[in-house]
């Protein structure tokens, strides 16, 4: 919400919610491409859309001390930019068929936004101010998104997302309905970092019904004084009650999230973090000796559009001293302490409240080689310091000073509908340790965001069937005070489902060609599992807190080798014809994975690994002139290799190299065409395995890299009964 530091790089920036704007802007840009209008005309047309900021239509004057003197609009009818707001999440577009990656990614699950905005009023939290008011997505819409997303992706986890998901009024009954629907499919539901007072026993018991996903709690500060200062409404009793509930239900690990460097913080506030972590560990150890508490501590960075936007940020040295204190005090078995990079936080502070002169610094840092700075191993803080020096800007000007109330801030021409005076009053209230109510359950704080006609808090509640009511609440969250009996079984007794027995075992053959050859075995397993879910097959699961599909794949060929003969053993809880299984799988697998055959087996029998005896490969070696050796002597080399009683190669594993005799693994090898070899290897008959590339290494010891230019494809796998 402060794009000024990158203003020189963008023609236009959307401020606020973009779902409704994107279609209109796309149409304008497409129309411009096929018209004769100027770029300036296009940008002027875009300014008529609420939420579109065109930096070039504003000129910035600076005072001699470096602060902004004036923000001057170039267009008379474009004095500033009001944020775009989606007032009804049910009518906003939301993907129901997201892209499914073929490799493991961060947040590899379906994310469903159940609520946008938070009116708790935490004074450090930019999102809590810029995304007001609180707008909840209806439970029916959430369930529709979940159902269609699971059907299209085959994912096994859904995360219900919100700034404060515990404030979603229908959370308990919604979790109950989702688990009732998807427990049999072993789909787990997870929640992001949760306010301690909303982490009830009912929520915890719901989450453990399929598999125990992790819990992250966000106390933010360690003492009642600091929690009042930042308007965080939870107490230590809430935190310890939630900790006790989680450990009682069988968890062994809880993560805490705190900040240090908050305004007016003193050592006793840091000691409060230590005391809470140790008290939580003691609670956990009462249930299990293996209990752990992981404490994460980030550096406070003042953000625009918050009461603390006028406050100074601590220096790197000051934050490091606080981290050192916490690290020393938390050096306790069972507690792990982790901090955010202080140099990263310093740069974040510069650009969070920076002006557009920093565009030159960013460009200079890029010229000095700065890339992917969010990755710890890529951050080059010295290069950034050099960039600041070469562009004549002092980063401490943006970080280390407290702004007076009358100063023009670089983002004062951007409006989030919240009164600037309200933010200043909240800053003063923080100094007095005054607490402001949540306006969805208490009185309106007159922040200026709601017009109480189109823009206002939107909350939902559950009533008996066919009596669902949409409640537009301006004063109180409608769920509060409702008789609990009116909810649809929010605290129904939770029973862990029993795994259904296996009644059929199917062995299916598939090929892995093209780009699919570069999937790791783990990624291939994930792709197959998701395909099985998309196919709707009644797959059997293991029991326990982390139920797994009863599916096994044949031993994988080395990465990059194509295969026409991969196998999968699949256990089902219902009888299906192999032809139907094959047809269902053929419809849903990603490109490169093709199922070609399926057959029914007895439920009890040898595993794939135990049944496979031989593997057959086709190898095409490089043609003459492609490598340094003479490929024309291939038949002689193969003949010599075949007639050898011992074939030794050097095998490197985990930085160790040893000599290995691979002759026992080779059943047959022959030249079947110019530059083409047929290789048959033994599997399961001798200890260990062999890679086709190792045979090439033995064929061409003088050219150890020649195998990289060879094309290798797995053709067959021979089973014990064949």
Image (cartoon, rainbow, N blue to C red):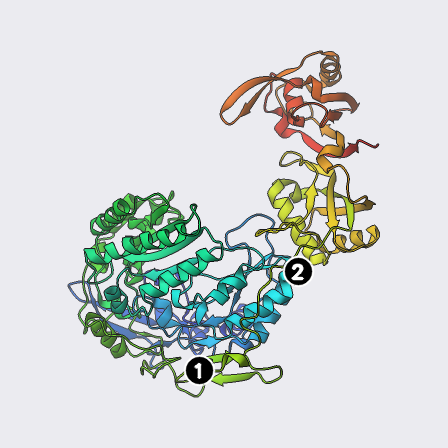
Q: Is residue 94 visible?
A: no
Q: Where residue 228 appears, x then y in whole percent? A: 26, 69
Relative to 566, say whether 548 is above or below. below
Q: Nearer the viewer, mark 2 or mark 1?
A: 1
Relative to 324, say whether 627 is above or below. above
**If the image is split into quadrants, where does the C terminus sit?**
top right
User: Which is nearer the eye, 348 or 150?
Assistant: 150
Q: CA distance from mark 2 to mark 1?
A: 34 Å
Spot the residue most to the bottom. Answer: 453
Q: Residue at x 44, y 65 (%)?
A: 199
Q: Residue at x 19, y 58 (%)?
A: 266
For marks 2 and 1 on the same chain, the one whose residue lies earlier in the sequence: 2
Q: Where residue 540 appears, x then y in whole percent? A: 70, 52
In this rendering, position of residue 250 left or right of residue 407: right
Relative to 463, say whether 163 is above or below. above
Q: Which mark is residue 184?
A: 2
- Quadrant of residue 3 within the rendered picture: bottom left
In terms of secondary structure, where does tag 1 sit?
loop
User: Which is nearer the eye, 273 or 469?
Assistant: 273
- Quadrant of residue 601 within the rendered picture: top right
Number of numbered markers? 2
Q: Do labels 2 and 1 touch, CB within 8 Å?
A: no
User: Which is nearer the eye, 449 or 73?
Assistant: 449
Mark 2 nearby-residue class (10 Å; few <14, some 14–19, many ≥20): some
Q: Where residue 658 appears, x then y in whole percent? A: 55, 18
In terms of secondary structure, where does tag 2 sit?
helix
Q: Where residue 464 appears, x then y in whole percent? A: 59, 82
Q: Which residue is mark 1?
A: 481
In this rendering, position of residue 489 left or right of residue 359: right
Relative to 197, say whether 319 is above or below. above
């Amino acid at each position: 919400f402060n794009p000024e530091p990158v203003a020189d790089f963008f023609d236009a920036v959307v401020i606020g919610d973009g779902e409704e704007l994107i279609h209109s802007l796309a149409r304008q840009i497409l129309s411009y491409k096929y018209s004769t209008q100027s770029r300036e005309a296009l940008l002027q047309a875009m300014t008529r859309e609420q939420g579109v900021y065109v930096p070039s239509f504003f000129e910035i004057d600076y005072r001699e001390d470096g602060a902004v003197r004036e923000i001057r609009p170039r267009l008379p009818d474009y004095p500033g930019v009001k944020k775009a707001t989606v007032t009804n999440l049910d009518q906003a577009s939301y993907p129901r068929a997201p892209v499914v990656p073929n490799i493991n990614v961060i947040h590899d699950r379906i994310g469903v936004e159940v609520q946008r905005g938070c009116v708790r009023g935490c004074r450090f939290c930019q999102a809590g101010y810029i995304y007001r008011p609180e707008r909840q997505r209806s439970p029916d819409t959430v369930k529709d998104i979940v159902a269609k997303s699971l059907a299209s992706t085959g994912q096994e986890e859904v995360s219900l997302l919100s700034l404060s998901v515990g404030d979603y009024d229908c959370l308990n009954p919604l979790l109950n309905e989702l688990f009732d629907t998807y427990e049999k499919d072993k789909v787990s539901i997870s929640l992001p970092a949760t306010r301690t007072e909303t982490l009830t026993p009912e929520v915890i018991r719901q989450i453990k019904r399929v598999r125990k996903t992790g819990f992250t709690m966000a106390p933010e500060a360690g003492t009642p004084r600091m929690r009042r200062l930042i308007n965080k409404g939870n107490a230590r009793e809430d935190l310890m009650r939630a900790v006790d509930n989680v450990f009682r239900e069988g968890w062994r690990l809880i993560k805490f999230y705190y900040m240090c460097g908050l305004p007016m913080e003193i050592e006793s506030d840091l000691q409060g973090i230590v005391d809470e972590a140790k008290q939580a560990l003691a609670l956990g150890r009462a249930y299990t000796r293996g209990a752990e508490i992981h404490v994460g501590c980030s550096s406070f960075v003042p953000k625009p559009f918050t009461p603390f936007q006028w406050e100074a940020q601590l220096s790197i040295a000051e934050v490091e001293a606080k981290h050192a204190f916490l690290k020393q005090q938390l050096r306790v078995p069972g507690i792990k302490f982790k901090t955010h990079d202080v140099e990263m936080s310093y740069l974040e502070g510069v650009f969070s409240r920076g002006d557009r002169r920093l565009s030159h610094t960013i460009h200079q840092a890029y010229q000095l080689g700065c890339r992917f700075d969010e990755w710890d191993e890529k951050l080059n803080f010295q290069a950034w310091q050099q960039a600041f020096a070469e562009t004549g800007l002092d980063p401490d000007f943006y970080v280390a000073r407290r702004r007076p109330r009358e100063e023009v801030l670089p983002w004062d021409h951007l409006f989030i509908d919240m009164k600037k005076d309200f933010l200043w009053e909240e800053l003063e209230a923080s100094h007095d340790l005054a607490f402001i109510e949540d306006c969805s359950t208490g009185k309106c704080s007159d922040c200026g965001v709601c017009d109480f006609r189109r823009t206002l808090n939107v909350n939902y509640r559950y009533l008996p069937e066919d009596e669902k009511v949409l409640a537009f609440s301006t004063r109180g969250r409608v769920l509060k005070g409702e008789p609990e009996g009116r909810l649809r079984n929010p605290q129904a007794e939770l029973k862990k489902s029993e795994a259904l027995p296996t009644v059929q075992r199917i062995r299916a053959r598939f090929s892995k060609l093209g780009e699919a050859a570069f999937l790791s075995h783990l990624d291939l397993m994930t792709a197959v599992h998701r395909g099985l879910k998309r196919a709707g097959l009644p797959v059997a699961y293991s029991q326990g807190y982390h139920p797994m599909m009863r599916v096994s794949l044949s031993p994988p060929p080395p990465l990059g080798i194509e295969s026409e003969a991969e196998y999968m053993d699949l256990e089902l809880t219902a009888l299906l014809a192999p032809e139907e299984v094959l047809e269902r799988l053929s419809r849903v697998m990603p490109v490169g994975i093709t199922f070609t055959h399926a057959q029914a087996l007895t439920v009890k029998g040898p595993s794939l690994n135990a049944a496979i005896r031989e593997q057959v490969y086709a190898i095409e070696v490089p043609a003459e002139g492609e490598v340094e050796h003479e490929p024309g002597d291939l038949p002689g080399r193969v003949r010599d290799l075949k007639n050898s009683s011992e074939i030794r190669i050097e095998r490197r594993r985990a930085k160790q190299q040893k000599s290995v005799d691979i002759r026992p693994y080779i059943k047959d090898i022959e030249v079947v065409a110019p530059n083409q070899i047929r290789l048959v290897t033994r599997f399961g008959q001798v200890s260990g395995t062999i890679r086709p590339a190792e045979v090439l290494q033995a064929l061409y010891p003088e050219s150890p890299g020649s195998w990289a230019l060879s094309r290798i494809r797995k053709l067959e796998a021979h089973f014990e009964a064949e």
